[in-house]
Image (spheres, rainbow, N blue to C red):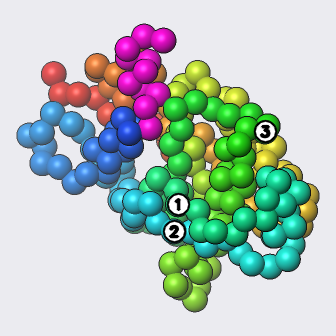
Amino acid sequence: MTSDAVLVSDPVFQLNVLLWALEDLPEVIAVRPVLCMAGYELESLGRRLLVPAEEPTVSALRDIAGSADRSPCRPDLCIDHQDDPVTLVVELKSHGFSPDSSNVRQAAKLIVASHDLSASYAETQPRPGHVVYGTVESDAARLAETLRALSASVASKGVSAAETSTPLRIHPACRSQCDEVCLPDERCHLASRAR
């Protein structure tokens, strides 16, 4: 792996790309905050998301993830949009993972907990979430397939599941000039450095 590829696969680097893209910055700065400009804002970092306690959910987690662990999950960040009630629940990974990975337990909990975030936000009205995984471009398709399979497994157990996607793709060759951030609505925002 090249040094650029190692950097781009680092979840801390990925998190920094998102935080800069969400920051409300003056135009004189060399960073274009494309997500902020598109109406997105940081809601929280590491927010505790409560996993539902109902029996179908507990059974589904036990069957799918091998554990009925209901401890809160903590995604890397949550992002809101000024015109959309759906909260993006973002988890960043250095690489994709398969259905046999130990990461499936966390992903299953995020998918179940994010269907309705109202309990986690202490709200009485439903608050839908969309689970978004970020990883290196070369692993995005594999991770998307794993998340689709996981969501289908959750739904087959009669448990409501949040939508999922792997829209954050960063290509190592692009690092010095730009970072592409693609969101679940399939709009891509190009964060290019000022020249």
79 in relation to 52, above or below:
above
Q: CA distance from mark 2 to mark 3?
A: 24 Å
Left or right of residue 163, residue 169 in this image: left
For residue 98, which quarter of the picture?
top right
Residue at (51, 42) in percent of width and height: 92
- Callouts 1 and 2 close, C-beta under 8 Å: yes
Residue 7 belongs to magenta span? yes
Going by the numbered disc 2, the residue's amino acid type is Arg
The mark nearer the N terminus, 2 or 3, is 2
Q: CA distance from mark 3 to mark 1?
A: 20 Å
Q: Where residue 43 sits: x, y (%)? A: 39, 65
Badge 1: how crowded within 10 Å, few (<14), some, or many (20+)? some
Q: CA distance from mark 1 to mark 2?
A: 5 Å
Badge 2: how crowded within 10 Å, few (<14), some, or many (20+)? some
| Of residues 45 and 183, the one drawn nearer to the viewer in this rendering | 45
The mark nearer the N terminus, 3 or 1, is 1
Q: Give the residue pinned by disc 3.
A: 99
Residue at (71, 52) in percent of width and height: 105
Q: Which secondary structure, mark 1?
A: loop
Q: Is residue 84 visible?
A: no
Q: Give the residue pinned by disc 2.
A: 48
Q: Where residue 101 sits: x, y (%)? A: 73, 38
- Point out which mark residue 18 bears: none
Magenta-colored span: 1-11
54 in relation to 30, above or below:
below
